[in-house]
Amino acid sequence: MIRIGVTGTDTAVGKTYLSTVLLGLLRRKGLRVAAMKPVETGVKADDPASDAARLRDAAGADDPLEQVRPILISEPLAPWVALARAGGTVDLNALDSAYHALSEDRDAILVEGAGGLLVPLTRDLAYDGLFVGWGLDLIVVAGNRRGTLNHTMLTVRAAHDAGLRVRGVILNALGPDRNGIAERTNLEALTDLLEPVPVIPFPWIRKDRPLEYAMEIAEENGFDRLIGDRVAPSLDPQPESA
């Protein structure tokens, strides 16, 4: 089974949109696909444009939204912070139960995190630990802008230290007019810095374009390298100091 976790280098870098593209490509392979957003914050339960609803639609599934998104929090905060403010905690058993139910009789599952890899679910568990526990490989979505080199390297290193295999990095254009020196040099720099982890660019696309159009662009840019059964090896462990 293909098990993928998607994280970002920050909020608002295009994780959900690119997750729907990846789900579409998995379905195009003829795979039975499930999607999950373990915790969603800052939306109402009946919002048809919520991340969970968009992911479920892209997966082509009729799974109950309560499984796709087991925990919903109204405040747009990290889950641990938001629930602590309300006097509660994340029910990890509920997350595990939903994940295993969604995985049953599927060929692939994609789990989208919230924010970045180290966003805390509890005082002692962040998304890196959750993804490790579920045996997920990682795809990192990086917004192409100044600061991306640092944020991406930190995320990939944190993933490596947690024991996650990184399938690749998607360098996502954040707007039609963002073409500064950082945006023009990030791809080459990250490709060199992260070798052998693939770094794949994705151009800015108007969100009113159909998903099939974005999927075509993704295929042309090599997204199959991210979702195939065989992927490039992750970073080698760093040598210990003598």
Image (cartoon, rainbow, N blue to C red):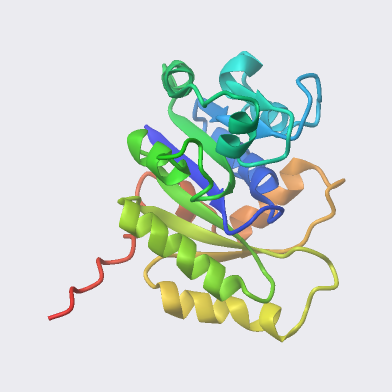
The answer to which of 213 and 81 lies nearer the viewer is 81
Q: In which quarter of the image is the N terminus?
A: top left
Percent across and percent down for residue 90 are 51, 26
Give left or right: position of 32 versus 219. Answer: left
Q: Write the residue at 64% across / 48% down.
A: 15
Percent across and percent down for residue 95 are 48, 23
Q: Write the residue at 73% across / 43% down.
A: 212
Image-quadrant location for residue 100: top left
On screen, 166 above or below 76? below
Residue 28: in sight, yes or no?
no
Give left or right: position of 5 versus 185. Answer: left
Residue 86: in sight, yes or no?
yes
Q: In which quarter of the image is the C terminus?
A: bottom left
On screen, 80 above or below 90? below
Percent across and percent down for residue 54 are 72, 32
Give the mark count: 0
Image-quadrant location for residue 131: top left
Percent across and percent down for residue 166 are 40, 55
Of all residues, the one furthest to the bottom in this rendering is: 181
On screen, 73 above or below 163? above
On screen, 151 above or below 77? below
Of all residues, the one furthest to the left in this rendering is: 242
